Image: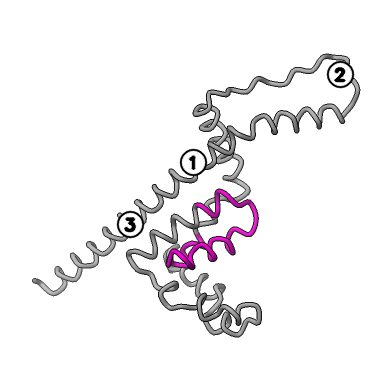
């Protein structure tokens, strides 16, 4: 029975687009020479951590079209495109509310702007849903700077942590391969 890692790799081989299918895509044809540069698709010790960091940035800062944005970011930074695209899945419907809450709390702490809850008088609350909706938008507008600062700080911290963790993981993986190779040959 294949391991979970082997199943994941097999799923990727089945579902990820091939170089040939991307070259044949009419939308990519004008920029295919730049997008399909082999260095952007190789797994190297420099391109993989860059891809992780850029994927985190695209995943945290952009709520839509994250994979496309990560792939575009990867081009000028010479990062690994598949890694950048896959790393955007760090944000999903389950993790995004938590990350946004953490970002808000970081921003409120940094800006010293702990928001008070909006309290409406009973007469205003009784007038209907319109006042509740406008009150919610007013609260969100007031918390915008805290959320924006927190999101930038959280994104930066997570991108640096992702870069460092993937670079360290790469070194450990290569060291393990060398150790196994030396044990196998007896040198």
The residue indicated by pointer 1 is: 154
- Taking the spot 85% from the left edge, 20% from the top edge, the residue there is 125
Given contact means CB atoms under 8 Å apart, are the residues at marks 2 and 1 in contact?
no
Residue 178: percent from left, percent from top: 20, 67
Q: In the image shown, does 184 or 163 lie closer to the viewer?
A: 163
Q: In the image shown, does 150 or 91 lie closer to the viewer?
A: 150
Residue 96: percent from left, percent from top: 59, 45
The residue indicated by pointer 2 is: 124
Other residues around mark 1 within 10 Å, as few (<14) / some (14–19) / many (≥20): many
Other residues around mark 2 within 10 Å, as few (<14) / some (14–19) / many (≥20): few
Which portion, as a residue range, is magenta?
Answer: 57-86
Q: Is residue 25 above or below residue 96?
A: below
Single out the residue that lies furthest toward the right.
127
Quarter containing the N terminus? bottom left
The residue indicated by pointer 3 is: 167
Asked whether, in this view, residue 181 is left or right of residue 115, the answer is: left
Cα separation, mark 3 vs mark 2, equals 56 Å
Given contact means CB atoms under 8 Å apart, are the residues at marks 3 and 1 in contact?
no
Asked whether, in this view, residue 106 is left or right of residue 169, the answer is: right
Other residues around mark 3 within 10 Å, as few (<14) / some (14–19) / many (≥20): some
Task: Answer with mark 3 or mark 2, whichever residue precedes in sequence.
Answer: 2
Q: How many marks?
A: 3
Q: Which label is found at residue 139? A: none
- Taking the spot 53% from the left edge, 36% from the top edge, the residue there is 150
Report if residue 78 lies within the magenta region.
yes
- Taking the spot 51% from the left edge, 62% from the top edge, the residue there is 73
Q: Is residue 1 visible?
A: no
Residue 27: percent from left, percent from top: 65, 78
Quarter containing the C terminus? bottom left
Q: Secondary structure at mark 2?
A: helix
Q: Secondary structure at mark 1?
A: helix
Cα separation, mark 3 vs mark 1, equals 20 Å
């Amino acid at each position: 029975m294949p391991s979970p890692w082997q199943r994941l790799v097999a799923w990727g081989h089945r579902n990820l687009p091939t170089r040939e299918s991307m070259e044949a895509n009419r939308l990519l044809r004008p920029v295919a020479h730049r997008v399909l540069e082999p260095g952007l698709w190789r797994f190297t010790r420099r391109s993989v951590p860059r891809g992780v960091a850029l994927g985190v940035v695209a995943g945290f800062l952009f709520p839509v079209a994250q994979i496309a944005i990560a792939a575009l970011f990867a081009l000028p930074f010479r990062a690994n495109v598949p890694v950048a695209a896959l790393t955007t899945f760090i944000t999903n419907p389950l993790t995004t509310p938590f990350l946004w809450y953490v970002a808000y709390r970081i921003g409120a702490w940094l800006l010293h702007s702990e928001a008070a809850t909006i309290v409406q008088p009973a007469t205003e609350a009784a007038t209907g849903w319109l006042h509740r909706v406008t009150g919610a938008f007013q609260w969100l507008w007031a918390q915008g700077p805290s959320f924006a600062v927190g999101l930038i700080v959280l994104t930066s911290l997570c991108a640096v942590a992702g870069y460092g963790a993937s670079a360290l993981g790469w070194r450990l993986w290569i060291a393990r391969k060398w150790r196994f190779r030396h044990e196998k040959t007896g040198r």
